[in-house]
Structure formats: structure tokens, C-alpha cells
Image (cartoon, rainbow, N blue to C red):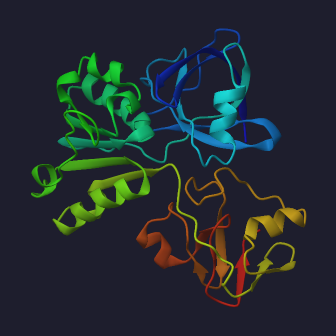
């Protein structure tokens, strides 16, 4: 992965448990361009790599802004960002990538919950600047837990922002029927947040006639099912002919790395697509949140960080 070395110019508290990081080049030069919805890989200690959305406007080439929520069940990334990355620190990041890109639409509906607001912030900036019609619906438990709330409340597009709080005085949970009960064939939905939140919106939209190609989703994490009771299977590497047995409870990438096979990795949850690998024969058991339904049916690629096999053997293009 090509990496940039950037300086943490500012670190600030944006909400309960959420910190913002403003990254700038060390020599003051312009940063590589990005598009709304993009993220970067942040390289942390001990080879830890985590993805965070860029939440500033894409035309701001002098900085990248990230929002990071400290998670109680952190696998190390959010804790490292909060406790070890301070103002003035130098961090390595990958070049911006976009798996949540916007597409032309007559009207855009942005739905974010919790830290899922981050990629939608850059989208809102672009939609407003280009004079497009949009609404942003932001759900959080309380105002104190709504990251970037002041920025949204004072933005030039503040009249298009709706806050939805599930607890405390004046609670006003997100109500989907008024927004999605009647599908708009010229609109597009963008959804980011916890799995349950995403599922509620995508299921409701599908049940009420919204087309799958109108709904774009970004997942920050995936529920991981235990593979302890799954059968073992073999993985064969087409380029070398090497064969490995993947036992119950093991992941393909873990076995390959332990045997010295280089596998690109990032999230290790089947969310980012970094480890996507071509399947030459065999039937994958897709357990990721990256591939869509049509891509899964083809069975010509798989995420080796979390997916397994339905067939006794997989031949991979490695």
C-alpha cells in the first residue's frame, strides 16, 4: 500500500467518545484529491490498519479530516487513535479510496447514525455546492453523542439537516414511512451506520419498491459469525500449486499468512474489499459485507479474511 506521512495538525472532541483529527502534509504541499464518500487507511502501531472516512469538503486539498469513535469492543484501532495519536504526531495513511461514491440523481437522501455521519458530511458539502436537492437525516442517542452536530447546525445547508434522537427530552426517532413509503425513481439513498440501522432502512426501502441500484450503503463493521462448527476445506494456490487445509475456526488469510503467503489485508471483517481474491474453481461461502448479491452469485471472487467454502476445495488466483 502506498503511504503518505501526514502531521496531526489538530485533534478535537466532537461528541461523547468521538474525536476529530485534522491531518496536513508535513511540508505544506497539497494532498492527493479525493471524492465525497472516500476513506483512507490509517497505519497504526504493530501493523494495525484501520479505515476512516474523509469528512471534509473534497476541494480542501490542504487537509484531511477524520472522525473516530472510541469503541468499547475495539479491536485496537479506535483506542490507538484516541490514546496514542496526539496533535503533532506523524501518521502514515494510504491514498484515498472510494467504495461509497455518489451517482447523479435528481434528489439524494442521506441517512447516517452515530459515527456513520462522517462520509455523509463530505457528500452534503458537494451536494450543496452544486445546487442539488438533498436531505440529511442524522440519528444519535442524544445531542451529546451526535458527532459534528455544531458543524451541521451552522452549515450553509442546515435547513436540509434533520436530527433524530432516541433518548432524552424531545426524542424524535427517525420515521421511515414519510420518507420512503413512496419510492422516487429519480432519487438515490445513501446509508451509513450500525448494521441494525442499515438493515432497517434497506429492508424498508426494498419492501416499498425502491430499486437496489438506488440504495448505496457503507458499513464500518460487520457481525462476525463463529466458524467453529463449519467443515474443513482445502485452498489451492493456482500460481504455486501449494495446498492448505482451513480448519473450523480458522480464516483463510490467517493460514496463508502463517505459511508466508502475502495477502493484502485491511479491515479483516469483510467490509473494505482489500483482500478480494479471484476464485478459479470451487464455491465460496460468502460471509462479507462488501460484495453485492449479483457479485456473490458469480462466485468468481471472495474476501479471504472472513469467507469460507461450500465446496471441499477452492482454487484461488494466488
Q: Position of residue 189 (x, y in %)?
A: 27, 49
**Residue 273, quarter of picture:** bottom right
Q: Position of residue 142 (x, y in %)?
A: 33, 34
- Disc tally is 0
Q: Position of residue 225 (x, y in %)?
A: 58, 71
Q: Nearer the viewer, residue 315 or 87?
A: 87
Q: Residue furthest top?
A: 28
Quadrant of the frame with the N terminus: top right
- Does residue 94 show up? yes
Residue at the image position 90 percent from the left and 67 percent from the top: 259
Residue at the image position 79 percent from the left and 36 percent from the top: 45
Q: Is residue 82 above or below residue 220?
A: above
Q: Residue furthest bottom?
A: 312
The answer to whether 225 appears left or right of 89 in the picture is left
Q: Is residue 232 above or below residue 258?
A: below
Q: Position of residue 209 (x, y in %)?
A: 17, 66
Q: Nearer the viewer, residue 88 or 240?
A: 88
Amino acid at each position: 500500500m502506498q503511504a503518505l506521512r501526514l502531521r496531526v495538525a489538530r485533534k478535537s472532541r466532537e461528541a461523547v467518545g468521538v474525536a476529530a483529527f485534522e491531518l496536513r502534509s508535513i511540508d505544506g504541499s497539497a494532498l492527493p484529491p479525493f471524492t465525497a464518500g472516500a476513506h483512507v487507511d490509517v497505519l497504526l502501531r504493530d501493523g494495525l490498519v484501520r479505515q476512516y472516512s474523509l469528512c471534509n469538503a473534497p476541494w480542501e486539498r490542504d487537509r484531511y479530516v477524520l472522525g473516530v469513535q472510541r469503541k468499547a469492543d475495539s479491536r485496537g484501532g479506535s483506542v490507538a487513535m484516541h490514546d496514542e495519536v496526539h496533535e503533532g504526531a506523524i501518521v502514515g495513511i494510504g491514498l484515498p479510496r472510494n467504495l461509497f461514491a455518489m451517482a447523479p440523481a435528481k434528489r439524494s437522501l442521506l441517512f447516517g447514525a452515530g459515527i456513520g455521519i462522517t462520509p455523509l458530511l463530505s457528500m452534503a458539502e458537494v451536494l450543496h455546492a452544486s445546487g442539488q436537492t438533498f436531505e440529511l437525516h442524522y440519528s444519535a442517542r442524544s445531542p451529546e453523542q451526535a458527532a459534528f452536530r455544531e458543524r451541521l447546525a451552522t452549515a450553509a445547508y442546515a435547513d436540509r439537516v434533520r436530527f433524530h434522537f432516541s433518548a432524552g427530552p424531545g426524542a424524535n426517532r427517525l420515521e421511515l414511512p414519510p420518507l420512503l413509503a413512496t419510492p422516487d425513481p429519480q432519487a438515490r439513498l445513501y446509508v451509513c451506520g450500525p448494521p441494525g440501522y442499515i438493515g432497517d432502512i434497506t429492508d424498508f426501502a426494498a419492501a416499498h419498491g425502491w430499486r437496489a441500484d438506488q440504495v448505496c450503503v457503507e458499513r464500518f463493521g460487520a457481525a462476525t459469525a463463529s466458524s467453529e462448527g463449519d467443515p474443513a476445506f482445502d485452498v489451492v494456490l493456482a500460481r504455486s500449486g501449494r495446498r492448505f487445509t482451513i480448519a473450523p475456526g480458522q480464516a483463510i488469510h490467517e493460514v496463508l499468512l502463517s505459511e508466508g503467503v502475502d495477502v493484502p489485508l485491511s479491515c479483516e471483517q469483510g467490509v473494505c474489499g482489500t483482500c478480494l481474491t479471484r476464485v478459479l474453481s470451487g464455491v465460496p461461502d460468502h460471509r462479507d459485507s462488501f460484495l453485492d448479491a449479483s457479485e456473490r452469485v458469480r462466485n468468481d471472487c471472495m474476501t479471504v479474511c472472513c469467507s469460507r467454502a461450500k465446496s471441499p476445495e477452492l482454487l484461488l488466483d494466488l
